[in-house]
Structure formats: structure tokens, C-alpha cells
Amino acid sequence: MAAKLDLNDIQGLIARGYGTLPHARFTVFATHDAAAGHALLSWLLPRVTPAGRFAGDSALHLAYTAAGLRRLGLPESAIAGFSAQFTGGMTGANRSRFLGDVGESDPHYWAWGGPHEPPVEGLILLYASSPEILDARQEELARHLGGRAIRQVTVLDTLELGSKEPFGFHDGISQPVIQGLPKARGAPPAGTPGGRVVPAGEFVLGYPNAYGQLTNRPLLPAPDDPRRLLPRDPAGSGAADLGRNGCYLVLRQLEQDVDAFWGYVRQAAARPDGSADTGSEITLAAKMVGRWPSGAPLVKAPDRDNPQLGDDNDFGYYRTDPQGLACPLGAHIRRMNPRDSLDPQPGTEASLAVNDGHRLLRRGRSYGPGEGTLAAAGQDGHAERLARAEVAPRRETGLHFICLAASLIRQFEFVQHTWLNNPTFHGLYDDTDPLAGNRQGCGATFTEPAHPVRRRYRDLPQFVRTRGGAYFFLPGISALRYLDQLPARARPEPLSLIRDEVTT
């Protein structure tokens, strides 16, 4: 029987992507001292949106880096309970190479979060139903930050939420369904490749994961929580569970070179005389993505786009397209979610269960001038944009990539390293992800399987570059309350007071 989620203690970002709040702004901040950090937390705490029933015109969420938790006074003994990836950060030399943040994506070139940039301590995510409400909430936040002399490391604006990402493809279709949330009711049965219900512990700490275990997280000696603000370890140790109802949050600013992508596709799909072939361009772009611009999966619409299948997520690969003749083996969606094609038993429940252990809950928003979505949508104007791009400077556009996970290394980092940036993924030879893969040294090839012979597209440019990023912990609301009272714990309290609080 699935564990019941404490929705009033879980931040709402885990439960919903805020489709009804299409406007968002993300503030990355750092404090000058513990007093400022606690003043900010005390002000934000009642404004944090829980995962329970929601019907407001705005939402707010709060997350911290390891440096931010230290600033609030969390001792090193507690910090050590977090994962090594979280405490070590995203920008160490070995971790950068592991993630593919090399070449133009090297952290030394980042706009924020890099080794030579101001340190990052926290993240505030604001969502609103209108630009006016978002501006009002952000202005209120900025006044409070300024009044406390808290540095805004960067403020990340986003485009109004739409159905397409900057390259022009319908996005946000394949999301895991979390056990214990309302969407899990009526979800497809076990064995169905699309829309599978994934154990809550894959995304929320303190609950069983896909392996039936509780993912490691910081557990504190019960005396360290005399006010009993934290839930207790569900395994029965009696420890105060700082991690329960929280999760890790990955934020990466990914710049997308829309002009380079469609320019390469236009050149690669041109007719022998050099003239443009729009139909072939759209087909090649869809092969690289694995879906048509409408979102229709190639495994169900191999020859042409079918908008009626735009939200279709109920498909597998092993039985319908094992050789990648419809959806190439190295296509973006096939790497990000291999579904039923994984060993040891492709096409079975065992394969799907392996895949469950590497899912990501995505909550990103696009940014930029807003032209990319329409211009790259295919037949409706991308050629005209490319012509203009020859005389106009390229303006930065891309994705503020956000994903939530209970294990950074087994979920985000595994997908990034072993699937997305792996040049030998699925038996290929020199192919990293055709959209987001790093081309530094290798991987600049895209292979399209076909009979009688395959076709290989060479010299793919770098279409996506990392421009900033950090690992955060998104605490449960009780954990935020615990962090908020840490300075009070530093002051001696009467034993009678402690005893009264424990017994109430």
C-alpha cells in the first residue's frame, strides 16, 4: 500500500507545474549574514505555497543551496546527511566534466553560479496568473530584499507559459505521475509505457522509492529538535527527519541557439541543387527530437505530423520500433525517457521498472524575446527568421531548466551523463543528444536508421549552452520552520520550556 503524502507539508511545486499561473520569475539570492537570512526566511515562510488544494492567483516557493543552509546555521553534522552532489555543488572540475559542462558551457563562462561569480545561497520562485500580479509580487520581494541588504545574484525572467519550447516543439508531454497525488488516480495500469505511476519516493524524500527503500537524507538526533517541528523518521529510528517532504531541485539556464538549429536542418535537408525543402527540414528536425512540432510521437506518426496525437504519451519503443526506423535510437525523447527499451528485459515490466528509477519531474520555463516559438514551428516562418538572422544580431533565448528528484546522481546526473551526453547510447558510435548534447571532442553526429542503409548527419553545431546553474534543496514546510528557529536554538532555553514544548 502506498504511503500517504503529507500534502500540507510538501511545497506545491512537487504537485503541480502551475499551468494556470503562466507568468513566472525566479530570484537567485545571497545574504550577507545569518540575521539577514533568517529575516528573509521568516518573511517568506507564511507565503510558501503547500501542495494541498490550490486556487490562488500566485504561488511562491523557496529552496536553498548547501551554502544557504550553512548560512542559516545548520551544523555540518546535518549538512553531511545530504548527498555528496548537493554539498559539492554543480561547478567542481570533475562534476562539470561529468555533466558535459565543458567548452562553451564551462562554468567559468557562466553568467551566474560559476566559480568566479557571487555565491548562490537560495532561490525564490514566483508564479502568477497575470503580468501585473507577478510584477506586484516581485516588487514586494525586491523591497524586502533591499531592505535587508540581501543581494539578488540574478533575476531570471520567463516567457508566458505556452505549449512550445524555443526550438518550436510541443513540450511538457511526458511527465511522471507521482503515487499519492490526485493525478495518480485513474492512471494507466502497470506495464503501460506512458503515464506510469512512479513511487513517491523518487521525488519526495522520506517515502519508498522505486527500489522500495528510503533515499538517504539528513536525519537529526531527536534532542536537536526539542520543539518537534520535524516529522520523525518513518523507518522508526526516532530521529528527526529534516529531509522528509522535501526534494532536490536542479536549476540550469540553458541557452538555445534556435537559428543554428534550423540553419543546420535547412542545410542538411536541402535538395541536390541547394534549394530549400521545407518538408524534409521539418522531418529531419522531428527525427532529431522524436516528435513532430505538434508533439505527435514518431512511433505513432512516422510519416507526417498528426496534431490529434499532440499530447499522446502512451507508447513504447521495443515492440513498435526496436530498430529506430520511426524514432531514431538517438533522438532526444528516446534518450530522456527510454521507456521499455532498457535491459535486462526490453519490452517487459522489468524494463519499465528500471526506467522508473531515472525519471525527472520537470518544471522549467522558457525565456527570451519570444520569437523562437513561432519562428521555429516549422512551415510557418522559420525560413524568414533565418534570413533575418543573417543581418540581425541573435538575441538570447532558451530554457530555465528545473527538475525535481530525490537522488541527484541516480536521476538528473545519470540522465545527463549516461543518456544525453553518451556518444555510444543505444549502440551508437559518435552521437550525443542531437538537441542538447555536448559536442566537445565527439558526439557531433546524428544517425537516422533506415533500410537499406542508415544516414549519418555530421558536424552538428552546439545548439544548447549552459549559462548558469546550481543544486538546491526544496525543503518541506516543517523543515523551513525548523531552519527558521535555528538562531533561537543557539540561545540557552529554560529546561521547563523545552519540557513543556515536548509534551504538548
Image: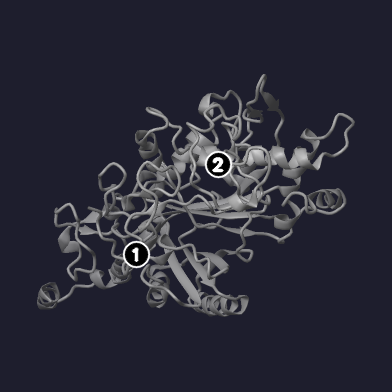
Residue 237 visible in the shown view: yes
Residue 490, position in %: x, y?
A: 25, 69
Write the residue at 63% across / 66% down: 160
Q: Is residue 214 left or right of residue 125?
A: left
The residue shown at (64%, 64%) is 159
**Closer to the eye: label 1 or 2:** 2
Q: Position of residue 288 (x, y in %)?
A: 64, 38
What type is the residue that disc 1 sits on? Ile
Q: Which image quarter holds the C terminus?
A: bottom left
In percent of the image, x 80 and y 42: which residue is there? 278
Query: Residues at badges 1 and 2 in contact (C-beta under 8 Å)?
Result: no
Q: Which residue appears farthest toward the right when viewing the image? A: 273
The answer to whether residue 99 of the structure is visible from this angle is no
The residue closer to the viewer here, 357 or 320, is 320
**Which element carries disc 1, helix, strand or loop?**
loop
**Against 426, is 243 above or below?**
below
Q: Position of residue 81 (x, y in %)?
A: 29, 50
Q: Residue at x 71, y 61 (%)?
A: 370
- Numbered badge on residue 10: 1
Question: Which residue is disc 2 drawn over?
Answer: 333
Comparing 375 with 293, the one in front is 293
Crowd tier of the residue under label 2, counting other residues whose Cα lies within 10 Å: few below 14, some 14–19, many 20 or above:
many
Q: Secondary structure at mark 2?
A: helix
Disc 1 packing (10 Å; few <14; some 14–19; many ≥20): many
Q: Which is more toward the observer, 434 or 79?
A: 434
Q: Amino acid at mark 2?
A: Ile
In the picture as drawn, the residue positioned furthest to the top comes out as 452
Looking at the image, residue 34 sits to the left or right of residue 164; the answer is left
* Mark found first going from the N terminus, 1 or 2: 1
Q: Mark number for residue 106? A: none
The reply, left or right, for residue 43 in relation to residue 488 is right
